[in-house]
Amino acid sequence: MAETTTPSQVLFEGGALVDGTGAARRDDTDVLLEPDRIVAVGPDAAGSAAPDVQRLDVRGCTVMPGLIDAHCHITFGEPASNDELFFHRPASTAMLVAAFNVPKLLRAGVTGFLDADCIHDLGPALRDGIEAGLVEGPRMTSGLNALLTAAGGTAGRLIPDGGQLGYAHVMGDRDEIVRTTRQQVKYGADWIKIHVTGSVPNHRGELTVWSLDELRAVTDTAHALDTPTIAHCRSAESTRLAAEAGVDLILHASYLDEAAVEAVVEAGSAIAPTFTFLANLVDHGAAVGAMTTQVDIFRGELEATAAMVRTAYDAGVPLLCGSESGFSLTPYGHWHARELELFVDLLGLTPLEAISCGTRNGALALRRPMDSIGVVVPGAAADVVVVDGDPTADISLLGDRRRLRHVVSRGRPVDLDRPWPTRSPLAGEAVGVWSRQLLTREVVQP
């Protein structure tokens, strides 16, 4: 939707409304926006419009809040391996690539996202650049490096025994945990992220690599500085410990059990299961040559986790939608809405409930009061998308960019008519290999 001038107000006329609050879909409901506020919804909208309002007929479409992706790695640059992520992304190049990629989120209907850990501590600078208008992108909250122990994280032995590398900052003792948490707040972190589990040799799945006392050192320090915490947890034990330590948002919560659910409920924590990465590998990995050895493991993780996440939801635990975009299996602009589909398919939520998880509940990720963003109500932030069709009848519509008729961010229309951004690879960006298999004598002379 190309614009030569920016209107003072935008009026969507005649469309259906899904407001993100959980209320039922309303037909023929006008919505009036201005920078950066929803002015009116319903019969009062047209009468409140300014003379120069831009009127848009959206009959046959649904007006709803923009999506909020609560788990997106915007600085990672879509690597196909940990090797690429840790050793092929110098800071200057990574920031250029992130600035190139972040507008894709808007083009996919994402108007807010949380990047809880970043490489080279780039996140807060990108966030501030978006807010200053230097870079086009959704609203963003950011962490800095994830806090790890020397036992590592998901990258195994690529994680050093101390210091910083890629997205990781390895802690040595409790004093360093406290000092680093304070430093991250000082340098602009909206969230402090902890990798509570990691991949350890000779152990199937991820192992808890933090103690409860160490976790509390992070949460107590961060909370004293008015900063929430977020934790990568891929076991029931790690989820329980994170909740007991007061972590505010738990990612994955894999293999959740009753004790972990009870701890999460007691703590008032939220969960962002981030099923999308696992489901993409299971369902579509073979199409792009992904490692098939992990398919059964990830399928089992999805099945084992979903039932208890639903139990947590029924107990009142807020669920947020995150895509883990930023890897080769979850490229930017393509999969941000799939988590909502998986909430319907795996958890049995209604599309209306899933939409609230992917919009209103995302206010937590953006550190905004509930019902101030991620909803289409008067006075809320003017982040709105218009979808051709009814996503409450077919939630998959939200994942089809061809169905997006309008995206409004901060009350300003986004140009959806531009060609999709493309670029050439940078020198040294990807892992180069000499061959895909060994050139043995038997290959040449069977």
Image (spheres, grey):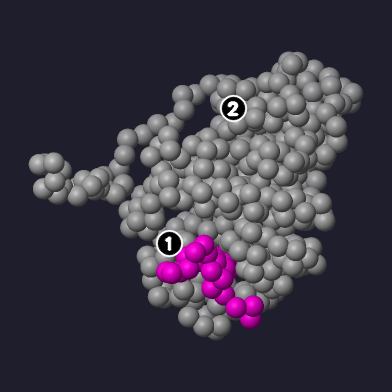
Residues 359 and 306: in front is: 306
User: What residue lies at 49% left-to-right and 57% top-to-bottom?
Assistant: 118
Quarter of the rendering occupied by the N terminus = top right
Residue 335 screen position, x and y as percent: 55, 38
Regarding mark 1 in the picture, which secondary structure is present there?
Answer: loop
Residue 445 screen position, x and y as percent: 10, 41
Magenta-span inclusion, residue 333: no
Whether residue 171 is visible here, answered yes or no, is yes
10 Å crowding of disc 2: few (<14), some (14-19), many (20+): some
Up/down of 400 relative to 283, above or below: above
Callout 2 amino acid:
Asp
Question: What label does residue 307 carry, if any?
Answer: none
Residue 127 screen position, x and y as percent: 55, 51
Up/down of 266 relative to 211, above or below: above
10 Å crowding of disc 1: few (<14), some (14-19), many (20+): some
Q: Nearer the viewer, mark 1 or mark 2?
A: 1
425 left or right of 53 in image: left
User: What residue lies at 42% left-to-right and 45% top-to-bottom?
Assistant: 292
Q: Which residue is mark 1?
A: 155
Residue 295 screen position, x and y as percent: 49, 47
Quadrant housing residue 412? top right
Callout 1 amino acid:
Ala
User: What residue lies at 72% left-to-right and 44% top-to-bottom?
Assistant: 347
Q: Which residue is mark 2?
A: 400
Q: In the rendered structure, which segment of residues is drawn in magenta?
A: 185-213
60 left or right of 186 in image: right
Residues 415 and 299: in front is: 299
Between discs 1 and 2, the one toward the N terminus: 1
